[in-house]
Image (cartoon, helix red, strand yellow):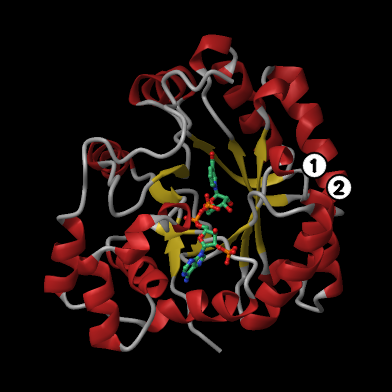
Amino acid sequence: MTAVPALSFHDGRTVPQLGYGVWQVEDEVAADVVVQALEAGYRHIDTAAGYQNEGGVGRAVASSGVPREEVFVTTKLANGDQGFDSAKAALQTSLDKLGLDSVDLYLIHWASPQRGTYLESWKALIELQKEGKATSIGVSNFPIPQLEEIIEATGVVPVMHQIELHPEFQQHELREFHARHGILTEAWSPLGQGGDILEHPVITEIAAAHGVDAGQVIIAWHLAIGNVVIPKTVTPARIVSNLAAAELELTSEQVEAINGLDRADGRIGADPANPGF
Ligand SMILES: NC(=O)c1ccc[n+]([C@@H]2O[C@H](COP(=O)([O-])OP(=O)(O)OC[C@H]3O[C@@H](n4cnc5c(N)ncnc54)[C@H](OP(=O)(O)O)[C@@H]3O)[C@@H](O)[C@H]2O)c1
């Protein structure tokens, strides 16, 4: 079985560096593909209340035969549930759907600064961790000022920050902030949502040199630069091949070549400073 490295959080826990994301996967499909992923050897699943597939993920974890303590499960607080009391209730709803007593990681899905409720939500996550319902706590889609604010106000540093990150959008400023604060960087849409980057000649030439596919090259690049990475696929062969990327070693020249693909206009998703939702 593919050996996936584990990275350490500052709270003493660890996370498998390569996981499996299930955004835009319907609940019934999630129940099937997450079993396939666990059978292939993934031990880290990334869902969210907003994906409306926590039920399917939970059924898959239960039916897979893999012991609960061997699977790292992340879910996320939906924007509409932000606030102290509502965030606490929202995790319980997620746990009920997942059929779990606790998640390994609970994230605030978006800072959504215009709502003005991210700090109260972070305080709720701190409580939820103390109650044992979330083993570790972190955030997603936080601009630097909001990250600084929650850290200064509570003294509690998120263990990980899940952000849009792919070869054409490399997030250097946030990664430097994370490095200074001991926060791991987790890449969402790591394959650029399956878009043109998979056909970029720099990527396809490296893939040809190793006899692998473009997706595997990009996943190996994320691992090489220290990201936690959660590619999504519902294609059975890619579920297996994406995981095998954990054993693909790029040369430093190949990593440098992909580092050179960063673009100022590379963002695909919403801007966390003003997502509009
Ligand atoms: N925190 C957030 O706000 C946020 C936002 C977006 C995503 N995420 C998380 O990050 C995960 C991954 O991001 P994502 O789903 O946006 O996109 P992604 O993983 O970058 O790309 C997924 C797309 O790439 C295709 N694909 C997967 N492996 C491939 C390969 N080896 N070769 C060619 N195509 C491949 C998939 O197609 P098939 O499925 O058809 O194979 C799918 O269309 C999500 O599932 C979610 O867990 C979080």
The image shows residue 56 at horizontal and vertical percentages of 82, 57
Badge 2: residue crowd in 10 Å (few <14, some 14–19, many ≥20): some
Q: Quadrant of residue 128?
A: top right
Residue 100: tell me if it is visible: no
> From the Cβ of disc 2, is ligand 1 less than 8 Å away?
no
Dividing the image into 4 quarters, which one contains the C terminus? top right
Give me the residue at 70% from left, 43% from top. 51
- The number of numbered badges drawn on the structure is 2
Give me the residue at 76% from left, 21% from top. 86
- What secondary structure is marked by label 2? helix
Q: Which residue is mark 1?
A: 94
Measure the alpha-carbon separation of dots 2 and 1: 5 Å
Vertical side of 146 occupied by 68: above or below: below
Pick the residue in front: 126 or 163.
Answer: 163
Give me the residue at 21% from left, 36% from top. 264
The image shows residue 159 at horizontal and vertical percentages of 47, 44
The image shows residue 21 at horizontal and vertical percentages of 59, 57
Q: Are marks 2 and 1 in contact (CB under 8 Å)?
A: yes
- What secondary structure is marked by label 1? helix
Badge 2 amino acid:
Lys
Vertical side of 152 occupied by 249: above or below: below
Q: Which residue is mark 2?
A: 97
Badge 1 amino acid:
Ser
The image shows residue 196 at horizontal and vertical percentages of 36, 56
